[in-house]
Image: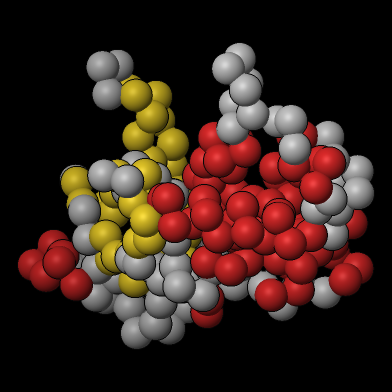
Amino acid sequence: MNTVEVDNMVSHIRCILDENETHTELSGISGERQLSLEDVIQSHLVSGVDAVTLLAPFSMIECDRSTAQADGVLVVPADILKLGWVKANSWNIAISQVHDISSPLYKMAKHGRVGSVCNANNPLAFETVENLPYVGVSRTIICFPSIDSESQTQSSIMYAKKASITNGRINVGSLLYEPSCLYIAGLVCDSMGWAKNRDYKTDAMLMLGIQPQMQEQVNG
């Protein structure tokens, strides 16, 4: 996953705002008892990158891969933001749709009807979420046809990771950097109550390939 310096990203977003906001909006926002504009920007970095990642197509995301397993099922990573696909070594293809364990399909697959509802060319995956004592929320993915225990390491989850800041750097994909900066600029305008500004979120959506008719829902 690509990472960038937090200070560089904050400076870039500050430049976007400086170029498009009036001087009076940017003046008078720093002081002994107030956050600086840079502080406001940094407070939105993680949520802004996550929001853009959730909206972005997987073709623009630098995905991570997990092979963590327990008791014959794939374990969903704790840092997952959204699931790309699931692949088991006993399948011929990867799948992107994961059903809830409450689905009637799960009962059919679990009770020996695998051949009638799924096979290696048409597999099924189900996610289960449990609240475990002393552990917290545990998320796993059960595969049908089931994972071959003799070669489990070939089975994996491809996923988009949550944004986080570590040692002054934030993980953001290279293709999502500019849309994220624009989207965060929009979040800053929202938090500052600035009415006169470019529609940064709309520009971010356009960079993600999202059509104009979808933007009102995103900006709302």
* Residue 198 vs residue 123, the one in the foreground: 198
**Which image quarter is the N terminus in?**
bottom left
* Residue 131 vs residue 15, the one in the foreground: 15
Residue under the image location 22 percent in, 60 percent down: 67
Where is residue 113 drawn, in percent x and y? 44, 63
Residue under the image location 53 percent in, 46 percent down: 45
* Residue 113 vs residue 58, the one in the foreground: 58
Q: Residue 195 is drawn in which quadrant?
A: top right
Where is residue 2 drawn, in percent x and y? 35, 67
Residue under the image location 75 percent in, 42 percent down: 26
Q: Residue 154 is drawn in which quadrant?
A: bottom left
In the current view of this chain or complex, which residue is farthest to the left?
150
Residue 85 seen in the current view: no
Residue under the image location 43 percent in, 42 percent down: 128
Residue 176 seen in the current view: yes
Q: Residue 153 is drawn in which quadrant?
A: bottom left
Where is residue 191 drawn, in percent x and y? 74, 34
Where is residue 42 drawn, in percent x and y? 52, 41
Location of residue 54 with respect to 166 vertically, above or below: below
With 128 as the anchor, is 190 left or right in this view?
A: right
With 121 as the anchor, is 213 left or right in this view?
A: right
